[in-house]
Amino acid sequence: MPLLVVLFGYSLGSQTLPAWVPEQSNAAYTVAGLAGALLLLASLLAHEAAHAITALKKGIPVENITLWALGGMTEMGKPRAAGAAFLVAVSGPLTSLVLGAAALGAGLGLNALTGWAVPAAVMVWLGWVNFVLGVFNLLPAAPLDGGRVVQALVWWRTGDQARAERAAARGGQVFGLLLIAAGWISVLRGAFGGLWLMVIGFFIMIVANAERRHAGLAAALHGVRAGDAMSSPVETCPDWLTVERCIDEVAMQARHSTLPLIDFEGRPSGMVHLPQLANTPTPQRETWRVRDVATPLSQYTTCAPDDFLEDVLEKVHRSSGMRILVTDGQHLMGIITARPPPDRARSRLRDQHHEKDISDPQAAGLALSGGPHHRHQHQEGDRAPQENLQDRGARDEDRVPVRHAPR
């Protein structure tokens, strides 16, 4: 449950209701405060559901609705037209205002018809909070809904979506600073509720800064295709290797922090990050397959070389970060990443590898003599090395028991 909902519910039961409806029992105030908090939570869900339903009607994909400490958030794709962006943005605040009017009317009617003072007070309070929620969200500052409305209007007026995003983001930066200043002045005057204004202001300013950077990036990437931004050829690792062999033969010589995995057919099957290898317990490295500790392909973003990079970035899975696999059918063509290889993770693997060399004379001999190491690159038409790896992997399958690590 969002923290603000809890605080509003507590304030309702401990302060608002005793002032509006005195001489009631503490149990009545507690139950009414809890009911008010749940009704407010339902109002927040209705606000976000209005965004989601309107987006779906306009053909905009919706990922999820999240309720968090400061309210709610609906994650969705980018609108393709200014009109659709306007309708999606305004639907949430309008829903809150309608709910506010309905709750206020219900509270006044309940009090007039039944004389139930406490339930009527809860409904009036709910109506007031929804009015505040609707009006606050209509303020012209991203990421508030009002900022989205401004963005849609500027987009419609100028025809430039990136310019509209920058304008809304600048409004969010200014508004965030104003909230922080107002909160600081309130605290100096002894009103510690101003701390919440400062928290909300910091949040708005941080998100607005991120959106302004995103708008600039989108403008720079306009017309750029995934094939132009990918790294190729790609260093890959057979997914049937044990973790130990992956570290010794592939990871120690890899130039990137993340290695795509390929199966026996040469198709991408997942991605393994260097820290995933380094964090694997040493006793299990000789029995666990690298695919057991890797992240499955379904959690990563894939695209074709001719896809526009701006559109691809809208589909990036947040859990996987900025790692995009570029494929042509079932073959891996390249990879798009945002960061260079981290030296810290590779140094950790190298230190662990060095300790193994010292404790294992045979391994030490290989290391000192420049023993065999392989850098696997997925290149179309390069079949002989892959077939050799398949034969070695098949022998490993017969010799090493498969242990699937929990994900």
Image (spheres, rainbow, N blue to C red):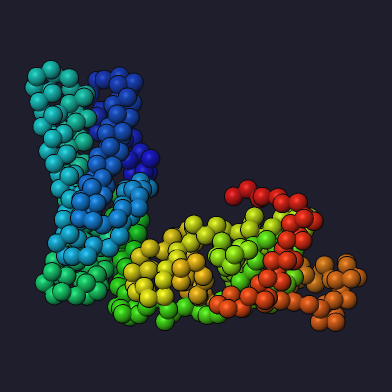
Work out whether 225 lies above or below 29: below
The N terminus sits in image quarter: top left
Q: Position of residue 363 (x, y in %)?
A: 85, 71
Q: Quadrant of residue 15?
A: top left
Q: Residue 285 at x, y = what percent? A: 75, 58
Spot occupied by residue 188 in the image (x, y as percentages of width and height): 32, 57
Name the image quarter holding residue 262.
bottom right
Left or right of 146, for residue 63: right
Q: Is residue 200 visible?
A: no
Classify residue 22 by image quadrant.
top left
* Number of numbered discs: 0
| Residue lying at 48% horizontally and 74% vertically, measured from the top left | 336
User: For this rendering, which residue is in front, 124 or 366?
Assistant: 366
* Whole-percent x, y for residue 60 in the image: 26, 57
Q: Which residue: 35% across, 65% down? A: 314
Which one is nearer the viewer's eye here, 42 or 267?
267
The residue most toward the top is: 114
Question: For this view, does 320 lie left or right of residue 81?
Answer: right
The structure residue drawn at horizontal position 11% and vertical position 72%, both measured from the top left corner, is 157
Vertical side of 188 occupied by 274: above or below: below
What residue lies at 25% left-to-right and 28% top-to-bottom? 18
Q: Nearer the viewer, residue 46 or 209?
A: 46
Vertical comparison of 71 with 354: above or below: above
Task: Work out whether residue 77 can be spotted.
Answer: yes
- Judging depth in this view, the residue of 301 and 51 nearest the camera is 301
